[in-house]
Amino acid sequence: MDTLLLKKCWILVTGMKNMDCAADMLDCIQKLEGKRWDKETKKRYFANLIQRGIVSPEYNRLSEEQRALLKSGNATEEQVMKWIEELYPVNSPIRAYVQFLTKLGLVKIDFEDNRKLMITERGHQFLEGKITDEEMMIQALTDWKYPRTREDVYDPEWKGYNIRPLMATIAVIERVNQADERNGMKPNGITLDEFMVYLMTMYSCGQIDDRVRTLEWLHYKEKQIGKSAHDQKMQEDEKIIMKEFAPIKSESVKSYRYVILNALEKTGLFVIDYSNKRINLNKEKETIYHQLLEKHGCKAY
């Protein structure tokens, strides 16, 4: 392994756990569209989020009067901006509340045009109800790839990378389901831990066949011997695989997993059973995900 190039597992910005609020957050951006994305605009955006109740400030640091005013919905933008300055004199979480909108391709900051804040065509379609939440998320995750652009292929940071995580997830789960059926098992997809160990650590399409074979063997071994045999093998694999991703902590990977699963679920293409800790394909959307695979494939370029 190239010691200068620690591998990157699949990561979406952690702010994406706010995906249920995407439309409301985008609406708060709308009144600022065309303005320079500077300190003042960021504060105004954050103030709008707080006014709308989309984001909660640190209530324990607000006075009773401030809390009551905020709860009544009568706090002005100027008042909330003043509170922001008091609550966050150095750093504020504002970046997290715009970064995931840019990751979804709903907003962009035009650095070539005075850092102008713009809502993209996808963003306007989403606001106007021309595309559904599911369609927006499918478009966004179809764009999610490693490396991010063809030019990045030549950047040493992305050496060896060549994958679209959404497409790879669909391809692996479908093939594992097919293998399980051949082996006399119900096609129940994969566990959330299997997803984290074997899918989130993929960085090349060339790894898909190996991951499918491994998961097929794990499921068969669980059927023949028991869950303990499955878990022991997966734990051994995890130790080996995660060495390539040091110094990423296992708890961080679990946090990334939650965000990714949330995003995948929003596409409507997957069924995530959190009680049984499994992820599977939504067979009702089979035509859609087959069309996506045919159109885009798993390769990033």
Image (cartoon, rainbow, N blue to C red):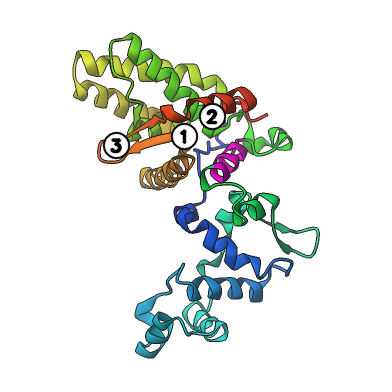
Q: Callout 2: helix, strand or loop? A: helix
- Marks 2 and 1: in contact by CB < 8 Å? yes
Q: Classify 10 Å Cα crowding around label 1: few (below 14), some (14-19), many (20 and above).
A: many
Of residues 255 and 22, the one nearer the viewer is 22
Inspect the image, locate mark 2, and give the three-letter code of the amino acid beneath it: Ile
Inspect the image, locate mark 1, and give the three-letter code of the amino acid beneath it: Leu
Q: Position of residue 265 (x, y in %)?
A: 43, 41
Q: Callout 1: helix, strand or loop? A: loop
Residue tagged by mark 2? 288
Residue tagged by mark 3? 277
Residue tagged by mark 1? 269
Q: Callout 3: helix, strand or loop? A: loop
Tell me the quarter of the picture where residue 257 sits: top left
Which residues, given as a range, are shown in magenta?
Answer: 135-146
Q: Classify 10 Å Cα crowding around label 2: few (below 14), some (14-19), many (20 and above).
A: few
Of residues 138 and 230, the one nearer the viewer is 138
